[in-house]
Each structure stands twice: as structure tokens, then as C-alpha cells.
Image (cartoon, grey):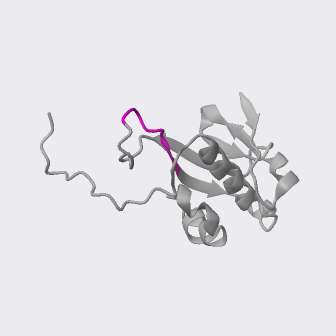
Amino acid sequence: MANDERGAGERGAAQDSVVWREEAGKFETPDGEAFLQYRLVAQPRASSGGGGASPAAMDMVHTYVPGSKRGQGLAARLCDAAFAHAQRHGMRVIPTCSYISDTYLPRNPALHDLVYKADEPKRSSTSSSM
């Protein structure tokens, strides 16, 4: 089932052109030609000691806008919707997509607090498992 995703920010009503396709792991334009693909992953490590499960993180893996639709701000609107969704659901974002990490986030510094930061030690591949 498709859901309209509306995000806060300066783009306002333009947000109406983004649809959340939960079953496909995408935010896309109504025609499906431009999209942001994500996958939900377990948060690598909870940052607070509150116990209980931490929400999933959104690994934003790919943003695509066809050449015929570039220059209209569609990639930014897709990102606006995805980041707003992550924020509403208490999720961190992993910006795997180069557009998001290299272009969108530098233009939207207020969103940096949603980004998963690997400042905690990662599990070693040599550690023993049970």
C-alpha cells in the first residue's frame, strides 16, 4: 500500500509528489521513475543503555532521477521525505548513497543528528561467537 510522505522544510507543498512504497523499500514519484531506495537494518549498536530493542536504521542505498527529470529538485524531495520518515520513526540514517552523503547532507546540516555515526567500536571479526 502506498502512503504519502510529507516532510518538514522549505520545500513545503512540493512534498506531495513523493510516495512511500513500504513493500518496495522506496520513496518515489507517483510515476515510479524517480526514487530513493532504502533497506532497514538493525542499528549497529544502541547508543543509550535503556535496554530493549533499538529501532532499525534506514540504509539509504540509492537515489535515481532519470535524465529527463533532472534539475527539478526531485532527488532532494525524495531525501526530504525519507529523512522525515526516519525522524518520525526514531530511526538513524546510514547515507550509503553518494548523492545523500556528498550533496544532500552538506546542504542540510540540521539533519546530521539523524546520521548513524560509527564512533563506537565495531565488533571485531576475530571475536568469538556463541
Q: Main secondary structure of the magenta part?
A: loop
In the picture, measured across the screen, residue 41 lies left or right of residue 36, that is left
Check the image and name the residue furthest to the front.
50
In front of the other: 55 or 38: 55
Q: Residue at x 37, y 47 (%)?
A: 44
Check the image and name the residue furthest to the top.
1
In the rendered view of the protein, which quadrant contains the N terminus?
top right
In the picture, measured across the screen, residue 22 lies left or right of residue 43, that is right
Let me know if residue 54 is in the magenta part. Answer: yes
Check the image and name the residue furthest to the right.
13
Based on the displayed image, in which of its 4 quarters is residue 128 positioned? top left
Q: Residue at x 43, y 38 (%)?
A: 54
Q: Find residue 51 and report its horizontal and vertical position in percent.
A: 36, 35
Q: Find residue 32 and report its horizontal and vertical position in percent.
A: 74, 44
In front of the other: 34 or 91: 91
* Count of residue discs: 0
Q: Residue at x 64, y 43 (%)?
A: 88
Q: Residue at x 39, y 50 (%)?
A: 47
Q: Find residue 74 and report its horizontal and vertical position in percent.
A: 76, 58
In front of the other: 5 or 30: 5
In the picture, measured across the screen, residue 68 lies left or right of residue 47, that is right
Q: Find residue 50 and report its horizontal and vertical position in percent.
A: 38, 39
In the rendered view of the protein, which quadrant contains the C terminus?
top left
Magenta segment boundaries in residue numbering: 51-59
Let me know if residue 50 is in the magenta part. Answer: no
Based on the displayed image, in which of its 4 quarters is residue 43 positioned? top left
